[in-house]
Image (tube, rainbow, N blue to C red):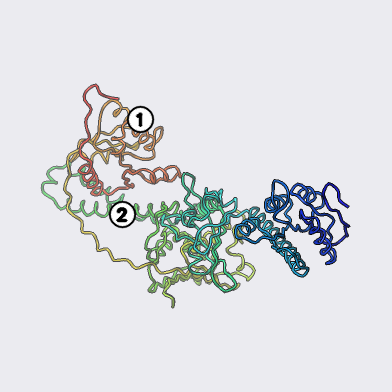
Amino acid sequence: MTTSGIEMGKTTKGLKTILVVEDERVVARDIQRSLSDLGYSVPATAASSEQAILLASERCPDLVLMDIRIKGDRDGIETASILRKRFDVPIVYLTAYADESTVARVKQTESFGYLLKPVKTNELRSAVEIALYKHEMEKRLRERERWLATTMRSIGDAIVSTDAAGNVNYMNPVAERLTGWKIEDARGRPSGEVLRLVEERSRAVIPNPLDAALREARTLNVDGVLVRDGAQELFVSDSSAPIMGEDGAALGAVMVFRDVSERRQLQRQLELSERLATVGTMSAGVAHEVNNPLSYILANISMALDGIRGRKNNPAAAADDRSWMDEIERGLMDAEIGATRVAKIVGDLRNFARPTPESREQVDLSEVLDWCIDVTGNELRPRGRVVKQFGEAPRIDAPSARLGQVFVNLLINAAHALDTGRREANEVIVTTRTDELGRAVVEIRDNGCGMSPEILERVFEPFFTTKEVGQGTGLGLSVCHGIVESIGGTIAFESERGKGTLVRVTLPAGRSVAVTPPRVEEPFVPGPRGYLMVVDDEPMVRGAIRRLLAREHAVTAPTSARDALALIVGGMRFDLILCDLMMPDLSGMDLYRELLRRDPEQARRVVFLSGGAFSAQAIEFLRSVPNRQVGKPYDSKELRRLVGQLLAEMGPVARLEPGAAN
């Protein structure tokens, strides 16, 4: 029976349904009968493209047998393309023609088979079964790929993968957001263009982790700063691994990373908090270190002043006895040595409290340990004695201030483990040596109370402490662990209840560097005479600099930054401006910004004098400006030499004509 040219047949529940599209009615019936005999359901046949599309929408067949040449405006290939797109149904073509152009068109529609008329029953069955199986496998594969893609998009970490050549072939939305690249722009590009990482402190370029994973065929973990064009840089932590095939060949690489900038900032704040708490604990020891040189500085200055005043009141004595001049000179030389020592203590303490990002250097462990033992003396001396057993140990590449924080914490912990009632028997032994791998080893051993195995397992946990409330933050050892690991070292404890504790810090040896010969001080040669301005809110500092430089230069010393700005706005121009960084009302930073707006040439000639940039704003400011910086306390000869050097380099400033003030 036919309905509108559509051949209808019997539907059998549970069988695979096949739609036959064939405009030759006899052929269609023959194929329908053959398929039914083979156990398939063929409820209908169609003779045109329109009928095929209609039946497919009504019947949802499992497969379509499509004649290439059918009646109507669309042939079988065009119709098959529509059916594939709309209903995702597999197509097996029927045709009496197999020319190259037809085969080429068939390929473009992703057909599942191709049968030549007249169709043999065994070939028909093979083609149908293979097409049904292939379509089912592809459907499962697509579902799996869709599930995998959905999973990758839903993961909170960024994912980037490459092919075997190292070119990007996938990025999830998180990776697009963090890198600033869209997958359509990144696909096919070398991964090094999309992911640019640098070290946080040195800004040295980090080799691309994806390329490294491909090249070395192993998993790599890297932390660094992700550089993004025109956007804020992010600190990321990543893991990269090769994608290996069954034959062991690398098919590509994948990198999973996340933005840890906020965590990094919190870690820095916790580290600073612990460092400042440690400074408070060390305060008595620091005071002792400062008071010793300060006592003979004051004594020698007092002696010199008394001698000068006495001779001024008794000129005859001054004429008869010149030996007092030698005595005063020796006293002032000792005072100078003491002042230098105080300056070093203050500088070390400042670096300890807020180390600069560029503070990594080659460190002599014995020097760092000597300083740490000195400044923790107030904690150690009342409880026991310190035994130093310094052996040969290599220098290491590390920020000395951060390393000092580690040993200060460990020494204070050792001191607190000692029973104050056994002072004579108590000791803390500090040892340095080189291990069999050439690494530097520092061991701090005490014979104090020791720790139980349960406590020993938790020593590096943040906020874990056995001290009473208010006596410790529980961050010290956690911070120490992080610092040592960042240097590439390890820290480990050995302890037994009632028998003391041994902490061992192992650090990689620094790279060998050429020894710089000691600098021979050259005699001071005054540079060209200049017109200078000294800006400092401390009258004594301002006066001392003015007196020092007035021997070779004309010096103006306004009492504030606002007065200094008024002089320049009024038309005065200076060859060099020595300016304090931190001042009330108008700071040196504010003065510089105003000069940069009004007179960039005068801003270029500013030299900053600073006793320490302790705010994040000041640290960032000094890092961002090209101007020279001089730390307080300054060396008089070096300051005079620097002024002469800068005047020679910059030359005299152009003076404004009268009445040309801005």
In the image, is 288 to the left or to the right of 502? left
Circle 2 Cα neighbour tier, 10 Å, few/some/many (<14 / 14–19 / ≥20)? many
Q: Quadrant of residue 463?
A: bottom right
Residue closer to the observer: 510 or 457 = 510
Q: Secondary structure at mark 1?
A: helix
Q: Residue at x 51, y 56 (%)?
A: 188
In the image, is 481 to the left or to the right of 134? left
Residue depth check, mark 2 versus mark 1: number of the one nearer the observer: 1
Q: Please provide percent x and percent y for residue 582.
A: 39, 39
Q: Given the image, on which type of amino acid does mark 2 rest? A: Gly
In the image, is 313 to the left or to the right of 500? left
Q: Please provide percent x and percent y for residue 110.
A: 66, 58
Q: Please provide percent x and percent y for residue 286.
A: 42, 55
Q: Is residue 80 visible?
A: yes
Residue closer to the observer: 152 or 183 = 183
In the image, is 326 to the left or to the right of 242? left
Residue closer to the observer: 137 or 274 = 137
Q: Is residue 287 visible?
A: no
Residue topped by disc 1: 562
Q: Which mark is residue 225?
A: none
Q: Given the image, on which type of amino acid does mark 1 rest? A: Arg
Residue topped by disc 2: 338
Q: Quadrant of residue 475?
A: bottom right
Q: Quadrant of residue 387?
A: bottom left
Counting residues from the start of the chain, the first of labels 2 and 1 encountered is 2
Q: Please provide percent x and percent y for residue 564.
A: 31, 31
